[in-house]
């Protein structure tokens, strides 16, 4: 069970930036991206189910509150294409200061979390990072290499 003194906003992708040292400009950029994003992504970011699922992932991997906050930031940034999806395991490893294998396991759990909005997240990722996605949105034969997480799985 979570400590009742922990701010529940650490699990809310649309609210977590108020707990971090992210600038007002960053928040403005984020909210602009939400407004331009497909509705499924907006719903994903604000849904209670998302917040509860993030909390569950944090509990499952025994993340400290600060780690949970950073994970929520990563989830948010990938959803609105501020961060490239394939960089998520490395971002998790670096920002949460966890071993590589644990970062990959957390990334896989997060991938399952994206399920509801996955198709729209994929489209946004392709639009934002076309040079990083081999074969474009219809490629089903592109290999999964290095720290790239296959969005199709």
Image (spheres, helix red, strand yellow):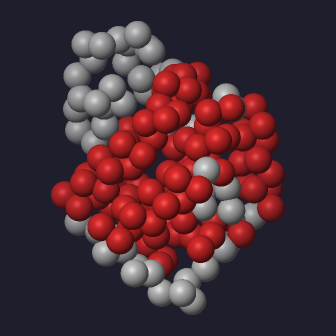
Q: Nearer the viewer, residue 149 or 3?
A: 3
Quadrant the N terminus occupies: bottom left
Taking 147 as reference, is 3 above or below it? below
x and y percent of residue 21 in the render?
Answer: 67, 72
| Residue 108 horizontal side relative to residue 125, left or right | left
Q: Nearer the viewer, residue 86 or 60?
A: 60
Taking 5 as reference, is 115 above or below it? above
Q: In percent of the image, x 72 and y 39: which residue is there?
A: 33
x and y percent of residue 110 in the render?
Answer: 39, 49
Q: In percent of the image, x 67 and y 40: which residue is there?
A: 42
Q: Nearer the viewer, residue 94 or 78?
A: 78
| Residue 10 horizontal side relative to residue 85, left or right | right
Residue 45 visible in the snapshot: yes
Q: In percent of the image, x 67 and y 55: which residue is there?
A: 14
x and y percent of residue 107 in the render?
Answer: 33, 50
Quadrant the C terminus occupies: top left
């Amino acid at each position: 069970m979570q400590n009742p003194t922990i701010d529940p906003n650490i699990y809310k992708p649309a609210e977590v930036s108020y707990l971090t040292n992210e600038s007002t400009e960053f928040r403005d950029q984020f909210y602009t991206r939400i407004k331009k994003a497909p509705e499924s992504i907006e719903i994903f970011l604000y849904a209670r189910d998302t917040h509860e699922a993030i909390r569950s992932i944090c509990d499952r991997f025994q993340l400290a509150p600060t780690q949970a906050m950073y994970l929520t930031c990563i989830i948010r940034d990938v959803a609105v294409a501020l961060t490239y999806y394939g960089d998520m395991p490395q971002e998790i490893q670096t920002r949460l200061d966890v071993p590589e294998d644990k970062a990959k396991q957390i990334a896989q759990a997060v991938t399952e979390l994206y399920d509801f909005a996955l198709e729209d997240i994929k489209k946004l990722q392709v639009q934002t990072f076309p040079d990083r996605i081999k074969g474009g949105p219809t490629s089903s034969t592109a290999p999964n290499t290095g720290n790239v997480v296959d969005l199709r799985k």
